[in-house]
Amino acid sequence: MQIKGWRLVAASPFVNAVAGAILLLGAAACSRGEKEPEAPPQAAPIAAGLELPAVWSTRALSGPVKGVAMSAGSGALLAVAYDRGGLEFFDMEGERIGEPALFRLRALADGRYTTVGDTPLTLFPGVTEAGELKGYIYSPGLMAPTQIDLPIPEDRSVQGICSGEAGSKGLIRIAYWTLTDSSSLTTGVLTATNGDLAWIPEAATLSDFPVKSCVFAYDTLVASPVAQGAASLTRGEYSALLSLQEGKPIQISTDYGMTTTDVHVRDGITIPAPLNPTAITALGTLPAGGYPGGVVVVAGENAEGEHRVVFIDPSEITLEPVKD
């Protein structure tokens, strides 16, 4: 099995290593006898001045947030990792689920729902402060997030991680890079069979810069040398990339980095938007809940000095306008 790769080069923040950040790498694995998947669908460019509303949030949190992740599958959960240590789960109403755990995380990736026997659970891949690959579990019978080992043979200290859809190949696709080899992304698929997790490795994908963040968009792995966080917002034929750079607005691209647009978040009626978001994730579709156009989730401190995770409605760009 071999990974095909390519690069797009353009004068935009997504692909300019000086200005800001994205190298596009094909991450769809295929054998010689298989047909290569078609390129993911893309949407029309977004006009300048895009402004999306904050519609809901958690209550004030205990401190600055390092990472946020959401789960896909049956229901959606939000995982929040803190700068000073600690991991909590929330539902899409912004309410805490169970008790917080004292795990110290370096990085956190989006999760997936599955069942083990008759037990439903949600798994979030992550990296400990010591650089170890771990999984963080939510299940209705657990009082707090639980940490498990992942069957990924990696002795080096891991620096960052991202995850994506695995389709019929398994539970979740994972990519990560290490402190000693930050220009190489190791990818593979985590499978779950009869209650046991297994790792199916794919070929390493090389970049010509040290990776700072990555994200899967359909079968494309997107890596950045400067963005502190990235997310994929995909819904049917709509596909967009979101990224965060320190001190700058959220950026969005619908053509994989050829052009980008700033996204400004306006306050909701009772929901103040974060001034400088520190973490981001997104889902284009949710199985249930009050987000018909999907949701973008960001964390940060607002003008009132509170640290919150804020839910943003992207319907303006993911849903077709209602015609008279």
Image: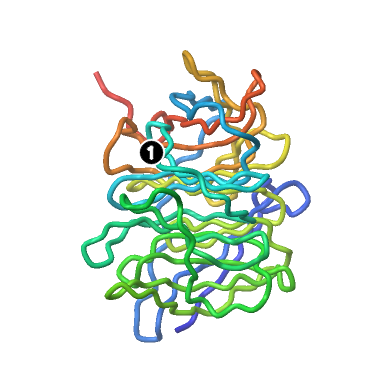
Quadrant containing the C terminus is: top left
* Residue at the farthest left position: 118
Picture residue at 57% right of the left edge, 36% below the top: 299
In the picture, measured across the screen, residue 149 lies left or right of residue 287, that is right
Q: Is residue 6 visible?
A: yes
Picture residue at 43% right of the left edge, 55% below the top: 111
Q: Nearer the viewer, residue 234 or 117?
A: 117
Picture residue at 40% right of the left edge, 48% below the top: 143
In the picture, measured across the screen, residue 116 lies left or right of residue 267, that is left
SS class, disc 1: loop
Tell me which amino acid carries mark 1: Asp
Q: Position of residue 240 (x, y in %)?
A: 48, 45
On screen, residue 34 above or below 168? below
Picture residue at 47% right of the left edge, 37% below the top: 296
Q: Is residue 254 visible?
A: no
Residue linked to disc 1: 91
**Dot 1 alpha-carbon crowd within 10 angstroms: few under 14, some 14 to 19, many 20 or more:** some
Among the 4 quarters of the image, the one containing residue 185: bottom right
Q: Position of residue 9 (x, y in %)?
A: 65, 58
Quadrant containing the N terminus is: bottom left
Q: Nearer the viewer, residue 150 or 164?
A: 150
In the picture, measured across the screen, residue 236 lies left or right of residue 109, that is left
On screen, residue 154 above or below 106? below
Colour scheme of the picture: rainbow
